[in-house]
């Protein structure tokens, strides 16, 4: 701050005279604003007590240095420099060379301010550098964390895949052995118990297998809907539990459907799961339909079974959710089937719709996009 009572006259030198207005109120009315080009002229007429120079560059420095020879120590104006471009040492050197030796009242204060500002900027720059380094460190940690997450994900995939493989083979062996025993020993409660337990185990392994399949990378390619439905039915036929119920499935596929777009294995798994549930939760026929709807193929699975209460519909896609967990005994299951369905369809960017009425049955459907203008007879 300049103290007016201590100042006789001031010249403010700015690269652009309009910015001097920012200084003038502080410097008060004694300050004269002038561009560098006119400074020489001003000095010829009158030597001020103080020259305040903002936005200094080499031209300023040269000119101020020349004042050293031109004015005697007593007459020489105090020069206060403000610049972001001139290094601190340079300012101080210039101060030594140009400033009057006399103890001008404002000089120490203004110089101190200019130097302080410089050192504050240096501190700020150090802080910015420290912050930038901390930020880089954070990014390094985040990358490392992401790498760990990727590794865990890979590990999860391989565990699920290996476990599935290791479970399926012995299960098949146990299943065949129990089936043979059951054929030989009729109505033996222990054998029936073994049969039921194997059936439950088979359902669990099937769920894990489907989960493993849906964790696989999906290949989004053209597919024939009929093939997906056939593949789902083939897998269901292999499931012991529904062997006697396959006849209840009615398939209705519109002729000449175009190719659809999606992951064949994933879509088959979805259809299989929906039919599986429909068979489980109903005793009547189950309808599987595929029909064209604009640029999509609507695939639906309808049953006329127990239905789902309205307030439960939004929950049935959650992992391990069962509308009536006590029904677990009546209807075997793990509660991951529909979570799997949603996971697969989510990865396709497709929604699944459920319409259901308690005691009357349910319909689950989704729309698979068609491969535009490709028509095949299926
Ligand atoms: P679960 O292995 O128990 O069948 P899901 O995830 O396939 O697991 O289904 C979750 C729950 O949603 C089931 O336990 C059942 O209560 C309900 N549900 C699913 N499909 C049907 C259906 N077609 N009819 C009635 N309830 C159903």
Image (spheres, rainbow, N blue to C red):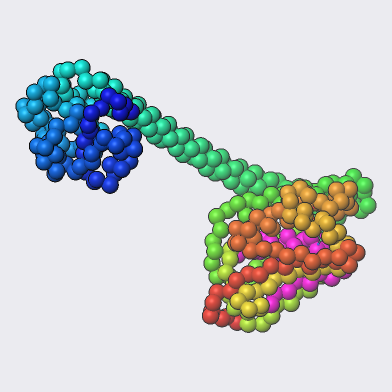
Q: Position of residue 186 (x, y in %)?
A: 92, 53
Look at the image and tell me in which quarter the C terminus lies: bottom right
Q: Is residue 95 left or right of residue 323?
A: left
* Residue under the point 60% across and 52% down: 215
| Secondary structure character of the magenta stretch overall | helix
Name the spot of residue 7 as percent of width and height, x first.
25, 27
**Relative to 88, residue 58 above or below:** below
Q: Is residue 284 magenta?
A: yes
Q: For the point 58% across and 66% down, which residue is it?
A: 262
Q: In the depicted view, which residue is nearer to us: 287 or 319? A: 319
Residue at 63% x, 82% y is 256
**Side of 25 where 239 appears, left or right:** right
> Quadrant holding ligand 1?
bottom right
Where 125 sits versus 232, above or below?
above
Q: Does residue 258 appear to the left or right of 288 in the view shown?
A: left
Most foreground residue, 133 or 173: 133
Magenta stretch contains residue 197: no
The percent position of residue 264, horizontal first and vertical second, equals 60, 65
Q: Quadrant of residue 371?
A: bottom right
In front of the other: 260 or 308: 308
Asked if residue 246 can be seen in this view, the reply is no
**For the magenta stretch, what is the residue range?**
264-291
Q: Is residue 183 visible?
A: yes
Please report the residue visible at 66 percent of the width from the left and 70 percent of the height from the top.
Answer: 367
């Amino acid at each position: 701050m300049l103290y007016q009572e201590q100042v006789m006259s001031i010249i403010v030198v700015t690269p652009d005279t309009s910015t001097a207005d920012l200084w003038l109120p502080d410097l008060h009315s004694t300050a004269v604003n002038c561009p560098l080009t006119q400074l020489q002229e001003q000095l010829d007429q009158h030597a001020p007590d103080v020259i305040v120079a903002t936005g200094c560059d080499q031209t300023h420095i040269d000119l101020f240095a020349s004042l050293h020879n031109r004015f005697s120590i007593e007459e020489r104006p105090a020069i206060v420099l403000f610049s972001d471009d001139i290094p601190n040492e340079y300012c101080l050197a210039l101060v030594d060379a140009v400033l009057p030796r006399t103890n001008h009242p404002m000089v120490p204060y203004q110089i101190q301010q200019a130097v302080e500002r410089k050192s504050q900027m240096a501190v700020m720059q150090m802080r910015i550098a420290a912050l930038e380094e901390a930020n880089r460190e954070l990014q390094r940690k985040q990358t490392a964390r992401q790498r760990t997450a990727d590794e865990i994900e890979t590990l999860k995939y391989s565990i699920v895949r290996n476990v599935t493989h290791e479970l399926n083979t012995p299960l098949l062996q146990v299943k065949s052995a129990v089936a043979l025993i059951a054929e030989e020993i009729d109505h033996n409660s222990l054998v029936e118990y073994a049969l039921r337990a194997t059936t439950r185990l088979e359902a669990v392994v099937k769920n894990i297998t489907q989960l493993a399949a849906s964790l696989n990378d999906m290949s989004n390619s053209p597919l024939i809907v009929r093939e997906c439905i056939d593949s789902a039915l083939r897998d269901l036929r292999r499931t012991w539990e529904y062997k006697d119920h396959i006849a209840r499935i009615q398939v209705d596929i519109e002729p000449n459907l175009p190719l659809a777009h999606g992951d064949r294995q994933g879509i088959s798994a979805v259809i299989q799961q929906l039919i599986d549930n429909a068979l489980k939760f109903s005793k009547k026929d189950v309808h599987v339909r595929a029909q064209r709807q604009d640029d999509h193929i609507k695939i639906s699975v309808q049953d006329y079974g127990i239905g789902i209460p309205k307030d439960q519909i939004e929950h049935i896609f959650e992992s391990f959710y069962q509308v009536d967990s006590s029904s677990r005994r009546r209807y075997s299951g793990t509660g991951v089937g529909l979570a799997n369905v949603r996971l697969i369809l989510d990865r396709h960017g497709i929604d699944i719709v459920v319409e259901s009425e308690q005691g009357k049955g349910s319909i689950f459907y989704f729309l698979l996009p068609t491969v535009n203008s490709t028509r095949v007879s299926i």
